[in-house]
Amino acid sequence: MSSSGHLVFFQSLFELKEPPLFFDVMVHLGTLLAVVVYLRRDILDIIQGIRTRLAGEKGNGEGIRLFLLIVLGTVPTGIIGLVFKDWFESLFSQPLTVGIMLLVTGSFLWLTRRAKKNGKKIMKMKAIDSILIGIAQGVAIIPGISRSGATISMGIFCGVDRELSGKFSFLLSIPAILGATFLESRKIASGQDVWPVLIGALVAFGVGYFSLKILMRIIRIGKMANFSYYCWVIGLLMIIISI
């Protein structure tokens, strides 16, 4: 869990340089496409809900409610990201802090084992649930804090159904990734080799899609806490390397 934490870990362990910005942006877009393809039915429900509401018709209340909750959850993420962007980026050069954050990630994943089996469905989900999940996503910009782990766990802590927590987490990531990609793309220099970037994006799409399928299955059966052991091990290794 936490791609940014793993990036800092391996850069620190093998003394690697950061990848070119264009490559990093395209890999994120590949992952984003995987999310869109996997959750295409939910996205189509949202589109249908918006279209129905604009036409002044009734029906598909779940789709429009899901859309409004995503918009609401995106607001705190955007505010946190814009206000603390420079500080968050400075943490990528601090492996010790990243190691500690991985321990934190493992801890809240461990706590999900106490969650109820059946939680709130979309029509019972409240505005405060969305806001808290959005705050969790904003805080997860810190390297070492897993974005999916933080948002899914927060949803579960709010009493939201496990599967809905997973789907909402990844739907909420779409505007966040698009926004971050737009901000970073303005820094990209021209004249870069395209083929390695396209291959990286394609690999990110394939790995992201199948990883998402596996992760959603794990969420449904309530086994997210198993990831905590891995986060603790990697976090401790990073702390030891940093000392």
Image (cartoon, rainbow, N blue to C red):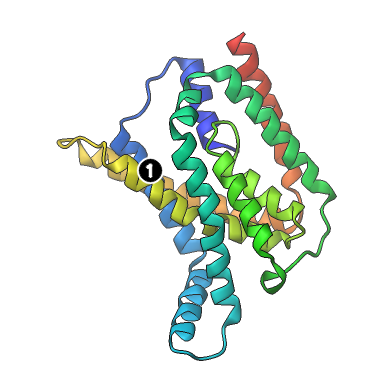
Residue appearing at x 30%, y 31% in the figure:
20
In the image, is 174 to the left or to the right of 224? left
Residue 200 location, x and y as percent?
35, 41
Q: Which residue is mark 1?
A: 27
Identify the image quadrant of the C terminus: top right
**Closer-to-camera residue (27/54):** 54
In the image, is 184 to the left or to the right of 40? left
Image quarter of residue 217: bottom right
Identify the image quadrant of the N terminus: top right
**Closer-to-camera residue (176/102):** 176
Residue appearing at x 69%, y 28% in the figure:
103
Residue 141 location, x and y as percent?
52, 38
**Closer-to-camera residue (92/239):** 92
In this view, which residue lies farthest toward the left?
191
Residue appearing at x 55%, y 19% in the figure:
95
Image quarter of residue 124: bottom right
In the image, is 188 to the left or to the right of 48? left
Label 1 Cα crowd, 10 Å radius (few <14 / some 14-19 / many 20+): many
In this view, which residue lies farthest toward the bottom?
57
99 over 148 or under it: above or below: above
